[in-house]
Image: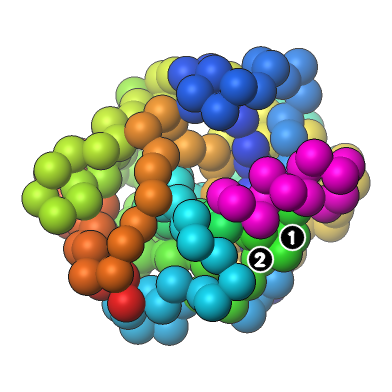
Amino acid sequence: MKIICIGRNYSEHAKELGNEIPEKPVIFMKPDTAVLKGNDFYIPEFSNDVHYELEVVVKISKGGKYIQKEVAHKHYEEISLGIDFTARDLQSELKSKGLPWELAKGFDGSAVVGNFFKKEDYDLQGLQFSLLKNKEEVQDGNTKDMIFSFDDIIAFASQYFTLRVGDLIFTGTPKGVGKVNENDVLEAYLKDDKILDIRIL
């Protein structure tokens, strides 16, 4: 199982980090060991500035290569929410040197994934999701604001990677990302349904 992640897929988030709006999906990867087991996230010792990034996650249900956008919807049946934990200080250092981001994005526990739900139960073109930190809303996103849709992403990524059943795609985060501290509690909601409840240690 591989985890494909999309960067800068909400224009306001790209702007808040001082990045240009991309013309094509920005892709990076996380290893399967990045998936957090349980509900406790431990801040890694190599970072003093770990940020939360809430995202809608798509699970591939039908593998393929060179998938056309018109049939991409047939390749996933379930969605969830996830948090892409990012060591922002390390990422900034790597970016300044023109180096890949994986050390800042792919460390153990950096990919939080909730339970999955049938996509038919949701309006994928207008899906509202939010993140609370210590009971205060910090992110409020809607898939209608995505630069590249789920189907766009699947079609693009499958030009380069063969998609397999069980692969996960983190589809990008809206504005409002920020630092986590010890004893913070993060709660993620898909519409009104709580999907994640994570404690920072």
| Residue under the image location 23 percent in, 63 percent down | 184
Q: Is residue 28 above or below residue 111?
A: above
Horizontal side of residue 100 vs 137, given as left or right = right
Q: Position of residue 36 (x, y in %)?
A: 46, 76
Amino acid type, label 2: Gly
Classify the position of the C terminus by image quarter: bottom left
Residue 121 visible within the image: yes
Q: Are marks 2 and 1 in contact (CB under 8 Å)?
A: yes
Classify the position of the N terminus by image quarter: bottom right
| Residue under the image location 41 percent in, 39 percent down | 177
Of the numbered discs in the image, which one, if any, rests on residue 102?
A: 1
Amino acid type, label 1: Glu
Mark 2 highlights which residue?
A: 106
Mark 1 crowdedness (10 Å alpha carbons): few <14, some 14-19, many ≥20: some
Q: Position of residue 131 (x, y in %)?
A: 26, 45
Horizontal side of residue 14 vs 90, given as left or right = left
Q: Position of residue 48 (x, y in %)?
A: 49, 61
Magenta-colored span = 88-100
Q: Is residue 45 above or below residue 179?
A: below
Work out whether residue 138 or residue 60 is closer to the camera in this orientation and state it. 138
Say whether residue 94 is magenta. yes
Majority SS type along the magenta span? helix
Mark 2 crowdedness (10 Å alpha carbons): few <14, some 14-19, many ≥20: many
Horizontal side of residue 61 vs 84, given as left or right = right
